[in-house]
Amino acid sequence: MAEATRRAAVPAQDRGSAPDPAPQTPARRDGSPAGLEGSPVGQGGLRVPRGVWVLPPVAVLALVFLYPLALVVQQSLSPEDGGGAFDAYASVFASQSFREALGTTVWLAVGATAGCLVLGFTLALIIAFVPFPGARAVAKFIDVFLSFPSFLITLALLFVYGTVGMANGLVTDLTGAAEGPFHFLTTPWGVLLAEITYFTPFVMRPLLAAFSQLDTAQLEVAAGLGARPARIVRQVILPEALPALAAGGSLVLVMCLNEFGIVLFTGAKDVTTLPMLIYGKAILESDYAAACVVAVVNIAISVGLFGLYRVVGKRAGA
């Protein structure tokens, strides 16, 4: 007690207490002090401004992507005959071939997207909820199928349904006819079939991912309450699949809009889409101004649809 009384009597400044530690400056995530301006310290202690690190990727992006796009836009505004800046646009928009190509492109893209949604949803349902041997292998094959080029699928359809394909050959062998009955591949319906065949896995992939996260307890409760399979699909599975359907459908719509290889390899001479019109104007007619005008229109539609895909994909969590 006496010792405690004696220590209390000594003033605080005479006790020899240690000084308070100096306040520490908080550090940034990159390790530099928060109170200092500039970017991370480079070699030799020099600080590099943040803008310098942004310049290389921006320069590569501008050189590889933006510069060719700027050339296309410039060429569309600079007709070779020396007319006005928008004369080429007025001429292309007034042409019957452009309007027909635009209409053909839109209805093929919309029709192929609708077909892919219906077929992809049905196949994804079977793979995910109908147990059968090899279901997992089929799901893995879908990932591999996404890497196939579009012309490969078209060639496969030609081998089966082409003029001299297996289906026509089988019919001619059995009936003795001069030619088989299958000639639809060279029509818009053949292009539509090829696009649906090729792009359906792009819808199935997000659907299978969504189905894998679906709580199976909901299905069991619905089945236990006496709901039929069609009602379970309509009221339980479909609402959960709508975001994935929207994301996959938006992606397919964008890709169908720009598809060139399928239309070319089917040999459908009467089917002219915007990419085919660009090819014809630039390569066959050497009308580069008109080709660039059609390309600008195609790019504008594609960018708009891609923006829609990004919005839908973000809401779907893709």
Image (spheres, rainbow, N blue to C red):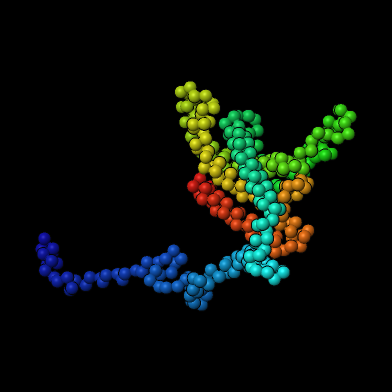
Q: In the rendered picture of this protein, how many numbered marks are placed on residues?
A: 0
The structure residue drawn at horizontal position 53% and vertical position 69%, both measured from the top left corner, is: 53
Q: In which quarter of the image is the N terminus?
A: bottom left
Q: Position of residue 172 (x, y in %)?
A: 86, 31
Relative side of 311 to 291, left or right:
left
Q: In this view, does 149 lie to the left or right of 242?
A: right
Q: Is residue 7 left or right of residue 49?
A: left
Task: Identify which residue is drawn at 53% across, 31% down.
Answer: 233
Q: Nearer the viewer, residue 121 or 60?
A: 121
Q: Residue at x 63, y 39 (%)?
A: 115
Q: Can residue 209 be seen in this view?
A: no
- Vertical comparison of 201 with 19: above or below: above
| Foreground residue among 186 and 20 | 186
Q: Residue at x 51, y 77 (%)?
A: 44
158 left or right of 249 in image? right
Looking at the picture, tell me which residue is in the foreground, 58 or 304: 304
Give coordinates of residue 205: x percent, y percent.
60, 42
Q: In the depicted view, which residue is nearer to us: 149 or 73? A: 73
The residue most toward the top is 226
Say which quarter of the image contains residue 135: top right
Residue 246 location (% of width, % of height): 54, 43
x and y percentages locating residue 45 in the rendered image: 48, 76
Residue 272 seen in this snapshot: yes
Relative to 82, residue 185 above or below: above
Q: Hey, which quadrant is residue 164 in on the image? A: top right
When asked about the image quadrant of residue 35, the answer is bottom left
Question: As displayed, is residue 200 above or below residue 36?
Answer: above
